[in-house]
Structures are given as C-alpha cells and as structure tokens.
Image (tube, rainbow, N blue to C red):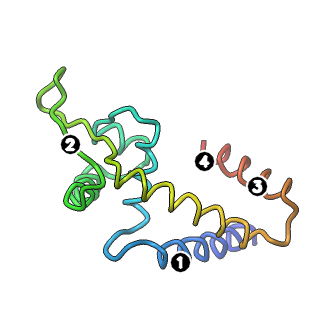
Amino acid sequence: MPTYALSLLGREAHDRMAVWLPEGLRLGHLAVLGALTEGEARTQRELSELLKIHPSDMVTLVDDLAKRELISRATDPADRRRNLITLTSSGRKLVRQATTQSRRIHRELLSALSRDEQKSVRELLDRALG
C-alpha cells in the first residue's frame, strides 16, 4: 500500500530527526524556526496558517522557543495586539545545523535512489504538500 510505505518513511525520518534535536525540542519547534529563516518577521497567526498548526499549539511552541532565546517577540507597531516573531542568532544557528542533519537523513533514507531521483522525490513532496 502506498500510504503505508509513506507512513513508514515518514516515521523513520521523524524518529531520526527527533533523536538529533536538543532536549525538550520537537519537530514542531523546528518547523517554526524554519519558517522564520527568510528573515521577515511573522505573526503567530501567520505561522499557524503557514505550518498548519493549531493556534493554541503555536502559542506553546512560540513560548518554548522564546524561553530558549531561539526567537524574539516584539509588539507589531501596526497592531499592538499582535506579536511579531523573528529568529535570534542562536535560532539561525540551530536551523543551519538542523538543515544539514535533515539533508543527511534524507540522503540516507533514499540511498537506494540516484541523486537526481532523490531531488525529484523532494520536489514532488513539496508540490504534493503545496
């Protein structure tokens, strides 16, 4: 079954990445950090919508990341009810390390495929998740 094969691959990727993460962080934390790498500040609502994470769960993730000083929060001057979230230098460093680790895991999990096929898988997954 294709869905079962995808779930096995996803579980293995998740488990390998989770082992690598610093104590107390989950992949959701990493997703938030990754969404901030473009450099522009985002609101919690924007992050929730982009990452398809429930707003109440996003509050917890953002609180955790702020406590670890991986992100900073500032009041949005256009709307003082909202916070703008940005990466700190520590957050940027963790994203760079995680990206390196993620690429290694991707290559390992798809090692039976050529480099071009691995690239195609990544592109197709990105398109499917659209």
**Residue 69: where, in percent of width, then height?**
24, 56
* Of pointers 4 and 2, the one earlier in the residue sequence: 2
Q: Residue 90: horizontal and vertical position, in percent? A: 34, 55
Of label 3 and label 2, which has the lower sequence position? 2
Tell me the distance, in whole angstroms, between the alpha carbons under discs 4 and 2.
Answer: 29 Å
Instruction: Give the image quarter of residue 14.
Output: bottom right
Q: Is residue 126 left or right of residue 24?
A: right
Residue 102 coordinates in the image, percent (x, y): 59, 63
Crowd band around label 3 with a 10 angstrom C-alpha radius: few (<14), some (14–19), many (20+)? some
Is 52 left, or right, of 66 in this rendering?
Answer: right
Mark 3 or mark 2, which is nearer to you?
A: 2
Residue 129 marker: 4
Q: Is residue 128 left or right of residue 98?
A: right
Q: Position of residue 52 (x, y in %)?
A: 42, 48
Q: CA distance from mark 4 to mark 1?
A: 20 Å
Of marks 4 and 1, the one in the foreground: 1
Q: Amino acid at mark 2?
A: Arg
Q: Name the residue carrying label 1.
A: 15
Residue ID at (41%, 35%) = 39
Q: Given the image, on which type of amino acid does mark 1 rest? A: Asp
Q: Say the numbered circle drawn on residue 121.
A: 3
